[in-house]
Amino acid sequence: MAVILDGKKVSLDIQEELRIETKERVERGRKKPHLAAVLVGDDPASQTYVAAKVKACERVGFDSTLIKLPEITTEKELMEEIKLLNENPKIDGFIVQLPLPKHINEEKVIQAINPKKDVDGFHPQNVGRMVLGLPTFLPATPNGILEILKRYKVNTIGKHCVIIGRSHIVGLPMSILMGQNYYPGNSTVTLTHSRTKNLKEICQEADIIIIAIGKPNFLTADMVKEGVVIIDVGINRVPDETKKRGYRLEGDVDYNEVIKKSSFITPVPGGVGPMTIASLLINTLNATKLNSK
Ligand code: GUN
């Protein structure tokens, strides 16, 4: 029987811990954490994610500011907004929700964020620190995955961890973190992607599979061995007339079949998604401590 890694519950547990710590902090006269989120355009999924981040701030007693900019915002205008956030002492950390409209260069934007306020951990300086194992803001989704592995005491040491997808947000940092020389990590990592040959055979050798490619039902039961640990990062909107909103959410895994062979598995929704939010809040509190020293 697979253990379901309940990200929703763990995330709420973490949020409760953060709420208590924040309350005590504010009672001692310290600064209340303040997260800002910049959303450019009207991508429906991004709107949902940002709304969830703002709501979570309220739940733990942080201040939050949502800056909504129209799709036609120029790169220059966005850079000006970032400069204001970098310089605003009230804002401890901020994120620019990705993806950005095509006419804006994401890399340029990320590099404009003050690394000390980069609670997404996307700035090259923070990515470099992560690679070297130095204190930094770890990117929210990978850190959320580490946290859920830790809380369920999933053994990662010496295990073969196969990562599917090499995005800068999930797959690439995850490959570094699972290979790091402390728990949860110390895995032997294989990073696979769209050019990988024999993906099925590689997955069949995996003790842990972390998949983040955005393709529903991609990972099927014939691709995994008995006892595998499955971390499903996909959040796909699959059209579904029976739902009021016209779609349902599915991960990248054929969940109903793969669960039968798994020792641990994350559901979608309610797995990795809520953990991402918990990590962002942890980073925001850490940014507040760092920046108000
Ligand atoms: N888009 C998808 N995931 C993320 C994330 O963790 N942070 C930001 N800023 N954008 C995203």
Image (cartoon, grey):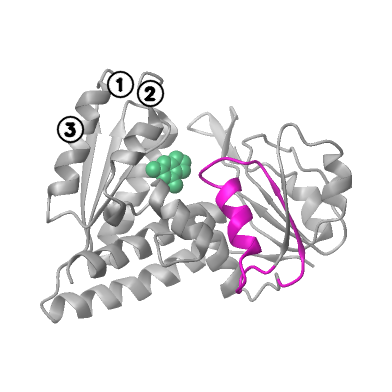
Residue 4's image quarter?
A: bottom right
Indicate left or right for 119 with 157 as reference.
left
Residue range corresponding to the magenta coloring: 157-186
Q: Quadrant of the N terminus?
A: bottom right
Indicate left or right for 100 with 23 as reference.
right
To which residue does mark 1 refer?
71
Q: Is residue 47 above or below residue 56?
A: above
- CA separation in Å, label 1 and label 2: 7 Å
Looking at the rendered structure, the kind of residue marked 1 is Glu
The answer to whether residue 261 is seen in the rendering is: yes
* Of the image marks 1 and 3, the number of the one nearer the N terminus: 1
Cβ atoms at labels 1 and 2 below 8 Å apart: yes
- CA separation in Å, label 2 and label 3: 17 Å
* Of the image marks 2 and 3, the number of the one nearer the N terminus: 3
Residue 156's image quarter?
A: bottom right
Callout 2 crowding tier (Cα within 10 Å): few <14, some 14–19, many ≥20: some
To which residue does mark 2 refer?
101
In the image, is the residue at mark 3 within 8 Å of ligand 1 by its beta carbon?
no
The answer to whether residue 139 is seen in the rendering is: no
Q: Nearer the viewer, residue 146 or 262?
A: 146
Kindly identify which numbered label has been placed on residue 283.
Answer: none
Looking at the rendered structure, the kind of residue marked 3 is Glu
To which residue does mark 3 refer?
80
Q: Is residue 258 above or below residue 7?
A: above
Residue displayed at 70% across by 38% down? 193
- CA separation in Å, label 1 and label 3: 16 Å
* Quadrant position of ligand 1: top left
Give the secondary structure at mark 2. Answer: loop
**Nearer to us: label 2 or label 3:** 3
Give the secondary structure at mark 3. Answer: helix
Looking at the rendered structure, the kind of residue marked 2 is Pro
